[in-house]
Amino acid sequence: MQLGMVGLGRMGANLVRRLMRDGHEAVVYDVNPDAVNELVKEGAIGADSIADFVSKLSTPRAAWIMVPAGSITHDTVEELASHMTKDDIIIDGGNSYYRDDIDRAHRLFELGIHYVDVGTSGGVWGLERGYCLMIGGEVETVNHLNPIFETIAPGYDAAPRSATRVGEISAAEKGYLHCGPNGAGHFVKMVHNGIEYGAMAAYAEGFNILKNANIGKHQRDADAETAPLDHPEYYQFDINIADVAEVWRRGSVIASWLLDLTALALAESPDLSEFSGKVSDSGEGRWTALAAVEEGVPAPVLTSALYSRFASRDLDRFGNQILSAMRKGFGGHNEKSAQ
Amino acid sequence: MQLGMVGLGRMGANLVRRLMRDGHEAVVYDVNPDAVNELVKEGAIGADSIADFVSKLSTPRAAWIMVPAGSITHDTVEELASHMTKDDIIIDGGNSYYRDDIDRAHRLFELGIHYVDVGTSGGVWGLERGYCLMIGGEVETVNHLNPIFETIAPGYDAAPRSATRVGEISAAEKGYLHCGPNGAGHFVKMVHNGIEYGAMAAYAEGFNILKNANIGKHQRDADAETAPLDHPEYYQFDINIADVAEVWRRGSVIASWLLDLTALALAESPDLSEFSGKVSDSGEGRWTALAAVEEGVPAPVLTSALYSRFASRDLDRFGNQILSAMRKGFGGHNEKSAQ
Amino acid sequence: MQLGMVGLGRMGANLVRRLMRDGHEAVVYDVNPDAVNELVKEGAIGADSIADFVSKLSTPRAAWIMVPAGSITHDTVEELASHMTKDDIIIDGGNSYYRDDIDRAHRLFELGIHYVDVGTSGGVWGLERGYCLMIGGEVETVNHLNPIFETIAPGYDAAPRSATRVGEISAAEKGYLHCGPNGAGHFVKMVHNGIEYGAMAAYAEGFNILKNANIGKHQRDADAETAPLDHPEYYQFDINIADVAEVWRRGSVIASWLLDLTALALAESPDLSEFSGKVSDSGEGRWTALAAVEEGVPAPVLTSALYSRFASRDLDRFGNQILSAMRKGFGGHNEKSAQ
Amino acid sequence: MQLGMVGLGRMGANLVRRLMRDGHEAVVYDVNPDAVNELVKEGAIGADSIADFVSKLSTPRAAWIMVPAGSITHDTVEELASHMTKDDIIIDGGNSYYRDDIDRAHRLFELGIHYVDVGTSGGVWGLERGYCLMIGGEVETVNHLNPIFETIAPGYDAAPRSATRVGEISAAEKGYLHCGPNGAGHFVKMVHNGIEYGAMAAYAEGFNILKNANIGKHQRDADAETAPLDHPEYYQFDINIADVAEVWRRGSVIASWLLDLTALALAESPDLSEFSGKVSDSGEGRWTALAAVEEGVPAPVLTSALYSRFASRDLDRFGNQILSAMRKGFGGHNEKSAQ
């Protein structure tokens, strides 16, 4: 079928490629004309404005937005809607906050326009691997778009069937899932990313413990303020981190795609010295923590992972100064240089 | 080559089977004669005592111990050593504390006996899937045992090669790794399990947030002590948890073997009502936290995951009573029934 | 000066008493006429409706609302405002969300009514001890109310002067502080309560560790899943928790009012067996965590304290069931009874 | 009575002063003769070697050691014991690991020497305020030393009596407590410091949230990786942190001595710019976490507080580099400069 794509960054462009490979027709638009031209060369129908883009879509139109989240998504939806007509469909495949989906769907509903929110996971690997799709919206609209989702998703063969599943192959087993009404798609994607933060931190902390397994070889000064290591003889290991990541990929309980990526990176750069260790966070990790707090369910792991990223960027600084001030206050301790 | 196995529980017996399938000779012993007989039927050489077991091994002997960790391992090592001679090898494949390995290897070294510690991951799936092996010991001894490790490990085909690795295939790429001197094998296995705790908790917390995404449908009483949900309209989702686990297996960033297992379990029992939620912990999770603290590296995710297991077993009870007592003390608040 | 009070629960009534003791005039209203009558007996002017209440106040009116937070506050403000006239003042002394203050102040501003948000700490002890007041609003309005605040607050003598403060005694040194524009009062009160959660949990966890210092006396079963205690000889202490709380009140670094309350409770009931350990949370702890996440500053301690309260009420249950299902999946482990 | 003091640093010297003021006799020794001379001028009996020190004490001797923890304590105990005779008493008032006390007491017991471990809290303020004493040892030995403890401790007047306590004034109410057999004193002191870490972090995190309450005033770039602040209008507060610390000292639930110290520091230096925020940790915080893990009781707040100190010293660095490597791996994200 036909799909329009607004936003031809890495992910948008690759979605279009994956669709065209499978025989779908793509109408494309981006604020950057070069991005449009590149896909036109590959067979897409180009547009030079949102108005032009909408005019080139057949009704009922289906326009997928793949732009950076936040205000740009909002503006794009608004402009698209202003050119569209009843029964057209706007799909937001970016990383929007699910609450914005709910509000947006209500507004568009009044115009007769259908809205679908799609959480899209797969990153830079999705072109080949397919994208895992978490979808929110009305049943009929989502069903109408199923051919698109089926092409974009990794497909049934991407993983061995769960032995406890029998009968017909479900959409989930092909890599896309209608999660519920509007917002549900991005809600599930949000939690996906929250879990991602937690799982990433689990590996990161573990590798850090391995890296420091030789700490008994280094003299640590003992004074009134710092206790010496009680048993340096138990911390004498120089562990090859890259090899550990590699060996865990085979047969261990913690084999995962994130581990595959870590092994890839470490084989190339065992010390990762090209990275400073200032770790960004995007909205989903924060929103997951907010959801946990509002629902009243404990999420110490997911939230710790988020906070560790904040701390990696020194956002704990004033708090730490308070601690140093207190220590000086009760014990006369002056700050020392780090460990 | 020949290997002796002491301890024929699920893992020990399957290691023997995997070895025999690949043409190795196995001498086996267990305190339970039925376990011995069963493997004898499958081609192993049985023994009816540790002394008998040692006498049936050709020198230099290689005896693998696969018994529950702790004092039983200790006693088995001692008894084996008392029957062994110079240059024999004792391999501990169980979940021993790496510090015990270091101490034990020193003692055995004085007797001329070599000791190898092997962290073995793979659980009930290892017979078919192979076991990921993390090995500590002297280079020569470990090399001598390589044919055994090669058979037990999953092998090179168990995962696609990391694109950043070139040249000859390393042992790590076959699923076994000589991590360092004695203790290094169980140290790496310990951290593996620590990561496992963190990653498991990441999924568990995420699924719990999904499960409670409909909390806005339930009336929550507001009074002086409990704030109502500010925006119930954003928590109206009834999400099919089992389908979410399934869809994430394909193309998502958090695809992993742990997720595969979760999807398996949820497909069979979406509410998991057969589980009470009292989660055990074994030594490795605790030891990983101890190592983090002693090394002085932060491990909030791994430690939170451990503590959540403690809390699942109500080990936070007295602390919580203290909190209730304080709340009554300053605010006159009486305890309410949950939420 | 004159102050009206709506809401004569424990805190509202005691605020009125504290004001009248110091010579202020109080007009009072509550939905419960008995509460009104009781204060009338003590010298207050009673009202039998909001309309009556407003009519009995001299202009510019100052009406303090002390009702359970949330929708009741909202409705009370609306009704008060509907009877008030330009330049009147509404003070919300309850536990409102500071965002509601900001929104509410904007709305009232259009009616010419001034709004002041006051975070009030002191609990059931405030009548004697005074209440710590954190105030948000316009400078002139707040200054106009200073005589009220000065009476309600504990006063300069409540704590020894900080040696680094010199010159005139500031409001903060008397126990009330104009924190900023509307919302600032409840924002600071919110963080106060967030800190309270963290500090309470610090004591609770510490006392729990003391309580379990005799764990080496109890046999702990060792099996493949549970490691035994390595050194039971180091956990043989039966510590008198109540006496520890008492001794720490004198000269220790962690002396505090919360500790005073804990010592009070433990002296009366050393095992706290009248408490079940289901710990409620009110809005402020949650809002503090939300603010930390939104600001991007790490708050692992405050958030852990909140999550522990959730867990005390079994809100981690489905997550724990997921963990048990995973453990069964990879290791064949069945759940055991707790520890 | 008479007491010998080895180690005349800040705390040791002040303990001697407090004892002499109350009429006790002090024999003093330090490796630094100046420290000895200074106290001799104030009335103490000086010694120029451990042997000389022991010879100047009357039997049964009581020698209090106040030296930096660890190997120095060990060596001092050994040398003292070598000069002492049956029934003499060695008191360790420093920050020793309680396990060392247990081992040490056993060894000394065989020589007929009694050992007492005393956790001493009070810091630089103890000379005036008195020291909170947590004591471990045999009943008779501890009772024999009671006159010393009574002088050192803050005394009954240091805090109002807990209303739930009646009858005779207990030692705990005077600021010293016999907590149990050897090790119990330092065990309770260890937990005291663990709580201190948690409570300090609670304030630190809270003040950091207040400090960043104006984050809505600063432009935060939104791109594919970083979500913008959803509601900048709710983060517009410039809060006077020093005044908040001051106001909370009076009547609030979180009034404490740590808060007093914070208020002191902030009044002098509102930005604390003289502190870098690299926060040291001494042994007790670590040991408390180890005890929680070994006992199997959750201590997320205390452990988070410890880990935050580690992170303040960049000990999370390699873990963070792993995170950045993963992010680049799946999403092509390059690291950005902080926030």
Image (spheres, coloured by chain):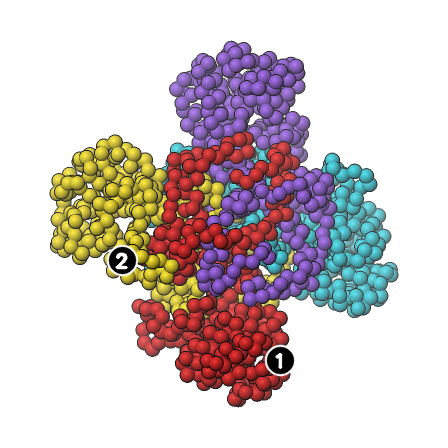
Chain colours: A cyan, B purple, C red, D yellow
Q: Position of residue B20 (x, y in %)?
A: 64, 18
Q: Against A298, is B32 above or below? A: above
Q: Identify residue type, mark 2.
A: Gly
Q: Position of residue D56 (x, y in %)?
A: 12, 43
* Of residues A241 and D291, the one drawn nearer to the viewer in this rendering: D291
Relative placement, left or right, of A124 versus C304 is right
Occupied quadrant, residue A87? bottom right
* Of residues B263 and C339, the one drawn nearer to the viewer in this rendering: C339
Name the chain under label 1: C
Decide if residue B12 is in sight here: yes
Q: Position of residue B1 (x, y in %)?
A: 58, 15
Q: Identify residue type, mark 1.
A: Glu
Q: Residue furthest right?
A: A59
Q: Secondary structure at mark 1?
A: helix
State the residue at coordinates (62%, 75%). Answer: C75
Decide if residue B178 is in sight here: no
The label shown at residue C79 is 1
* Of residues C39 and D88, the one drawn nearer to the viewer in this rendering: C39
Q: Please tell me how crowded label 2 is: few (under 14), some (14-19), or many (20+) other residues with Cα within 10 Å.
A: many
Relative placement, left or right, of C15 versus D90 is right
Q: Which residue is mark 2?
A: D155
Q: Against D21, is D90 above or below? A: above
Q: Secondary structure at mark 2?
A: loop
Q: Quadrant of the C terminus of chain B?
A: bottom right
